[in-house]
Amino acid sequence: MAKILQVRLDDKTKTDVDILFSSLGLDTSTAVRIFFKAALERGGIPFPVVKPTLVEKTLDEKIIEAALKRNPKRVTLKTNEKGHIIIDKELQELHPNIYDWAVNG
């Protein structure tokens, strides 16, 4: 007979894991069962558990995080192989505010 397990998560985490597992073709309950079975087979947590390092975010990461918090209208920008924004005439014409930000930072 199956037992019920309740787990408390904040709304954002619950939504994020539901979306993630759904994209993998799983529901969250199935994903949790997979985790538990893998833990039993391994005899512990089925992935390395390491103390997180306190790595300072790069300026680009901080800018992206701040921009996403404002929930902006999404715009796809062209980037070069290093991930830098390609600043061209098309960007200037289509998105002058982004162009200004990219140029004048």
Image (tube, rainbow, N blue to C red):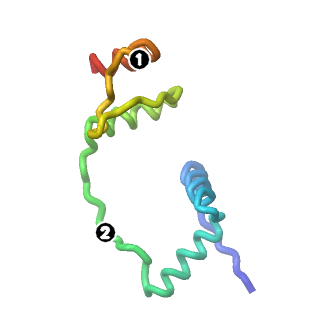
Q: Residue furthest right?
A: 1
2 or 1: tag closer to the N-terminus = 2
**Mark 2 → mark 1, Cα distance in angstroms:** 45 Å
Along the viewing direction, whichever of 3 and 76 lies nearer the viewer: 76
* Residue 15: image location, x then y, percent: 60, 51
Q: Secondary structure at mark 2?
A: loop
Give the mark count: 2
Q: Amino acid at mark 2?
A: Val
Please give the residue where the numbered disc 1 appears in the rendered image.
90
Quarter of the rendering occupied by the C terminus: top left
Identified at 28% across, 43% down, the residue is 57
Q: Amino acid at mark 1?
A: Glu
Along the viewing direction, whichever of 84 and 53 lies nearer the viewer: 84
Quarter of the rendering occupied by the N terminus: bottom right
Seen in the picture, residue 86 relative to 6 is either above or below; the reply is above
Instruction: Determine contact: label 2, label 1, CB under 8 Å.
Output: no
Location of residue 32 (image quadrant):
bottom right
Residue 3 relative to residue 31: left or right: right
Identified at 58% across, 61% down, the residue is 24
Q: Secondary structure at mark 1?
A: helix
* Residue 8: image location, x then y, percent: 59, 61
Please give the residue where the numbered disc 2 appears in the rendered image.
50
Seen in the picture, residue 15 relative to 71 is either above or below; the reply is below
Seen in the picture, residue 52 relative to 64 is either above or below; the reply is below
Location of residue 67 (image quadrant):
top left
| Dot 1 alpha-carbon crowd within 10 angstroms: few under 14, some 14 to 19, many 20 or more | few
Identified at 41% across, 17% down, the residue is 90
| Foreground label between 2 and 1 | 1
Residue 24 relative to residue 76: left or right: right
Location of residue 14 (image quadrant):
bottom right
* Residue 76: image location, x then y, percent: 46, 31
